[in-house]
Image (cartoon, helix red, strand yellow):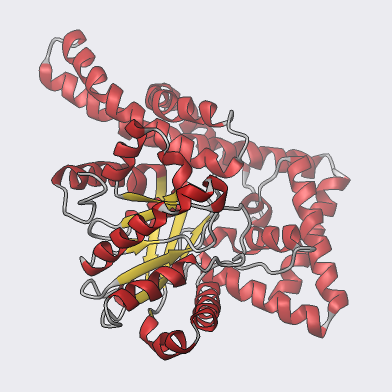
Amino acid sequence: MGKQNIEKYSKGYALIKMMVGFWHNNVFYRKVIVLGRDNINPDDHLIFAPNHQNALMDALAVLFTQKGQLIFLTRADIFKKKAIARILYYLKMLPVYRIRDGFRSVVGNDEIFDKTIDVIRHKNGLVILPEGNHAGYRRLRQLKKGICRVAFQAEEASDFNLNIKIIPVGIEFTHYTRYRQVLTVIYGKPIEVSEYHESYKNNPEIALNELRSRLSSEMKKIIVHIDSEEDYEAIDELRTIINGRYSDKTRFPKLFRDRMLIQKMNRLKISDFTLYKKICSLSLDVKHKADELKINYRLLSKKKHPVVLLLTVALGLIATFPLFLYGNIFNMIFLETANLQSLKIKDVQFRSSMKFGISMALILVLTPVILALMLILIPTWWVAILAFFSLPLSGIFAWIFYLLFLRVKGGFRIRNYFRSNNSEYFKLKDNYNELVSLIATL
């Protein structure tokens, strides 16, 4: 499968998607929350428009929460080497050329445009990231006109009979680069391009701007959008302080809670600027002091840290420490190796993509090797098979063990601060309680 028949169904690609999708949805992320699938009709001609904050992981978030074989438009410079280009075409990606790629290269977009029409007509679903490039800020930036131009030109080439629908997609990560985070993907209500046909026929440039503005507005409804640049850090941290405990909720996801909180802060900025600035100041104070004292917000929110509970959990951790060490065989080989390599990447937003790619590659390469070694070294074959399947399970246990260890360690640290009458801790606790109380009154 190559560029010429990229819209055709591929059994090999389907197998790869199934394997990689399992790693993405069940291991790399601890939970994937998907809402709005009922807004998608697979019989329509669709273009998906996700926000772009976390490099390749944004595209994967759409790919692994949708059925079928979506086609992605991506920057052309990664297609320069023929061997890599063949792999990218096999993975259902098409290049988009920009002026910076050279004026002659832009002519290649004509061929790509013809291919996108085939993709849309074939009802694969075309994915275009309308911000153009990624940035690690929880806000929607200015959209490029490319996605609107593709939609209109595809309609025009089909005598305006395709009735293309653009699906806004909101993607939110509880943390951009850490393992075992929560990914939330929301599919918004479709925008019917046909609503802008007449405007396009009369003045294409006006229609492009109208559709782009509409898409931007619809995308902002389903993402965490912090418009303020001056108070961005304070409001971004406020989401974690107030709503962090709701990260795994599916009935009313944290993303919606964050949006409500931001909207309240936006209104407060107008109605009571002094209180608004006080909340922003408290948010940053709590963040910096919590970092300094090495206390996370979940520990800070607890009223008590019973010594009996802490000791009981600590004894349990001591008793299961050998299993933790065994589980780390899995974590060190597949996860920590990828983590260490990703730290070499200067662009922080690419680190998660690097971690995902390396860990997945290690799984594919080393899994059969580890299985073969176990079958050779362990005389009884069924024991070897059990030992092999115990590795990923013990790896998950090791991760839970580590989280419990942090809970116990943090609990004893707070008890020590309390016992020693640490003034910095009590100041942090007072600021935290005041902040939570102020937010509750909004």
Q: Nearer the viewer, residue 57 or 239?
A: 57
Tell me which corner region of the image, top left, top right, bottom left or bottom right, holds residue 269.
bottom right
206 left or right of 38? right
- In this rendering, would 169 be left or right of 103? left
Locate the C terminus and report the quarter of the image it occupies. bottom right
Q: Is residue 265 left or right of residue 104?
A: right
Q: Which of the 4 image quadrants contains residue 233?
A: bottom right
User: Is residue 308 in view?
Assistant: no
Q: Is residue 325 above or below residue 314?
A: above
| Residue for point 42% across, 38% down | 356
Residue 294 location in percent, x, y? 71, 40
Whole-percent x, y for residue 272 in the image = 83, 81
Please, is residue 106 above or below residue 380 in the view?
Answer: below
Residue at left 12%, top 22%?
A: 382
Residue at the farthest front position: 104
- In depth, the one of 269 and 323 nearer the eye is 269
Locate the N terminus by quadrant: top left
Where in the figure is residue 188, as x and y percent of width and height? 42, 75
Q: Can residue 15 be seen by looking at this rendering?
A: yes
* Residue 295 occupies quadrant: top right
Name the residue at 54% across, 61% down.
131
Total numbered circles: 0
Q: Position of residue 267 (x, y in %)?
A: 73, 82
User: Which one is nearer the viewer's eye here, 334 or 342?
Assistant: 342
Q: Nearer the viewer, residue 228 or 73?
A: 73
Residue at left offset 53%, top offset 26%: 340
